[in-house]
Image: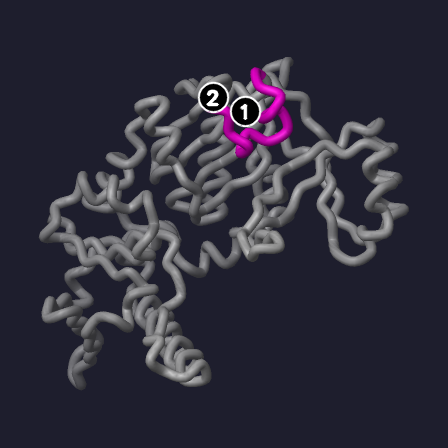
Amino acid sequence: MNGKILVVTASDEPSVKKVLEFLPGERVIRIDTDALLRRSFSFRTEERTSGWMLTLDGETVYQEEIGSVWYRRPANPKASSELSAEHQSFVENEAQKFLRSLWSTLPREQILWENHPSVLREIEFNKPYQAQTAARAGLTVPETLITNDPRAAEQFLERWNGEVALKTFGGHPLKDEEGRPQSIFTNRVSRETLQLFKREIAYAPVMLQRYIPKRIELRVTAVGERLFACAIHSQDSERTKDDWRRYDFERVKHEPYQLPPEVEAMLFRFLRETNLVFGAIDMIVTPDDEHVFLEVNPSGQWGWIERLTGLPISAAIAELLANPLPSPQ
């Protein structure tokens, strides 16, 4: 018995259900942060102890009972629609501050966090930091330019003979005319394309990266001390050649992949330096079999990989949470 497992997530997060199937229900305390204000809760500290007790809908947990925390894509608390807009904003802000205070009381040196909020803040959407850390770990990383200078963008394109990809930092999708979020995919940029949006570069930073030729792409899901590598044959479909997230499951094969030992070692060095317990790492394998690091999503999805390959990622997450080692974070 390694204590209670605190699952901090959102009510509509799809990955949680599968992992919970592998966990003993009596050890799990789930907090859907978006629904917090629809539950009855009390948090109490006592004068002579450093611990606390939290009661959710009549169920009480003590701080010292918690052995691991799965911090999985929580959402902002939502206040009652019966309140005015001003009061909704106030109440939601108060609830968010309460939750942040709660997380800060859980000692990182004594329990496992997957992943700690401070680690997420440092690495999520932080492409330069990821690239620097990966390079220090020995991984190959493509040269990157972030600029709002059209001339600098032109020079970068010329430097790589027009073989350049345009990327975004992510995390803030554009919306269409009907307010629906639209994904922005990675695209190759030609000299002609650059001329078309040359003026727009000055309005916002763009990220340009040397285009890496692909034999296959990899999604490597790290869970503690385990790596689950999936080969994505993105070059088998015109739709997915530049970005496999355009998904073409009929033509694009997904299969387990054996990483070379030296690449595994470099990835573990990267994970240790970034303090990540979980991460979804994107890589390219070139026609010359070079393994190139692109980025890590510390809250990435894995459901479709598990479904297509049988890799036991959900079970591994559950095992780590149920039998945690002290968190490196």
Q: Nearer the viewer, residue 273 or 301?
A: 301
Quote the CA–CA distance across marks 2 and 1.
Answer: 6 Å
Determine whether 50 is above or below 2 in the image. below
Q: In x, y percent, where is residue 53?
A: 17, 73
324 with respect to 189 (left or right): left
Please, what is the three-letter code of the amino acid marked with disc 2? Ala
Q: Residue at x 31, y 33 (%)?
A: 313
Residue at 28 percent across and 46 percent down: it is 16
Q: Quadrant of the C terminus?
A: bottom left
Report the amino acid beneath label 1. Glu
Residue 74 in picture, x, y percent from top left: 37, 58
Q: Which residue is mark 1?
A: 217
Q: Nearer the viewer, residue 99 or 57?
A: 57
At label 1, counting other C-alpha atoms closer than 10 Å, the crowd grade (few under 14, some 14-19, many 20 or more) is many
Question: Tag 2: Cα neighbours inside 10 Å, few (<14), some, or many (≥20)?
Answer: many
Q: Is the residue under label 1 in contact with that under label 2 (CB below 8 Å)?
A: yes
Q: Name the residue at 46% across, 41% down.
A: 271
Is 308 rendered above or below residue 129?
A: above
Residue range highlighted in magenta: 236-249
From the viewer's perspective, is 132 left or right of 1? right
Q: Is residue 52 left or right of residue 228?
A: left
Give coordinates of residue 281: x percent, y percent. Answer: 49, 36
Residue corresponding to mark 2: 231
